[in-house]
Amino acid sequence: MKGEIEAMTQSGQPTYLIMLGAPGAGKGTQARLIEESLGIPQVATGDLFRYNLSKETELGLLAKSYMEKGVLVPDDVTVRMVEDRLSRPDCAAGAILDGFPRNLDQAAALDELLAKYNQKVSRAIYIRVEREDLIARLTGRRVCKSCQAAFHVIFNPPATEGVCDQCDGELYQRADDSRDTVEKRLEVYFEQTAPLIEFYKDKGVLVEIDGGLPIDQVQDEIIRAIREN
Ligand code: AP5
């Protein structure tokens, strides 16, 4: 599978893939599955905020108040964090952006940032999932404290309850996966992030994937789409 899609990154041009979709659509799950094949890292803004929070940095403490409410962290803070992350050596060949951009202003900021290096968004992978399924996925999600891998108590259970299959880390339930905060996150998504679907469609880089399929089939569909588009 690696050989099938790495050609995309062999053009000499960096590849910037955007994982687009509602909270719980499977953006993080899929980004992790394809990063090795593509040879570019997953850059997940939510994970970066949570990492900063675990280290109690100024950025983490600022983000905490927004994340707890299920609303977006201010754009200037988020864009600066992404710019810093993309400037690191491991992103020289590009990145899989997971959770960014999340509104039209962030999308414009990303275009501006990439334009400085004569680059642009290669593809936006929109993972489409029904609202009811999103709620079930988020409220049953368990995440590894060490490596951030996501599991689900029913749809994707770990081999041993409470233990990460990949690194033996401890699994926990994210504070923002409570029913009330999930409702708020979905509201914010439909209001502020969903308009990006048209935005990237107009640019001709949008690929739509049926995210209601089982995880391995979604992965196959994404790889097929990257290869064929
Ligand atoms: P973030 O961490 O980005 O959360 P999110 O976008 O709400 O996305 P999730 O991580 O919840 O879902 P996912 O699509 O990655 O799903 P997953 O693969 O885990 O953001 C959190 C907060 O940070 C925001 O609310 C905001 O405050 C702040 N923030 C982040 N980015 C920001 C930005 N750019 N600007 C401003 N603020 C920002 O899968 C979910 C579950 O479903 C798992 O249990 C998984 O096992 C299961 N699953 C996955 N695929 C399938 C499948 N095909 N079938 C069945 N189950 C599946």
Image (cartoon, helix red, strand yellow):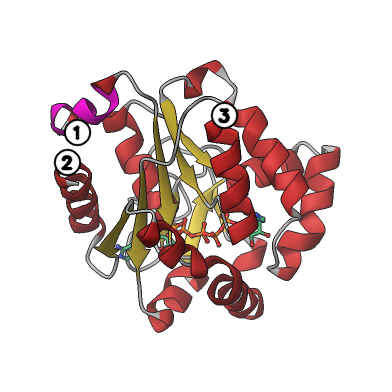
Residue at the location (71% across, 60% down)? Answer: 67
Q: Is residue 3 above or below residue 194?
A: above
Residue 181 rendering spot, x and y as whole percentages: 65, 74
Residue 13 rendering spot, x and y as whole percentages: 35, 23
Rendering quarter of residue 55: top right
Q: Is residue 228 above or below residue 11?
A: below
Marks 3 and 2 in Cβ contact (< 8 Å)? no
Q: Is residue 7 magenta?
A: yes
Q: Which of marks 3 and 1 precedes in the sequence?
A: 1
- Residue found at the far bottom of this picture: 132
In this orientation, which residue lies closer to the viewer: 126 or 185?
126
- Amino acid of disc 3: Leu
Q: Is residue 163 above or below residue 87?
A: below
The answer to whether residue 178 is left or right of residue 93 is: right
Residue at the location (27% across, 70% down)? Answer: 212
Please state the extent of the stretch shown in magenta in the rendering: 3-10
At label 1, counting other C-alpha atoms closer than 10 Å, the crowd grade (few under 14, some 14-19, many 20 or more) is some
- Amino acid of disc 1: Ile
The dot on residue 86 is: 3
Marks 2 and 1 in Cβ contact (< 8 Å)? yes
In which quadrant will I find the N terminus?
A: top left
Q: Disc 2 marks which residue?
A: 227
Q: Is residue 37 magenta?
A: no
In this orientation, which residue lies closer to the viewer: 11 or 6?
11
Marks 1/3: CA–CA distance: 22 Å
Residue 20 rendering spot, x and y as whole percentages: 43, 57
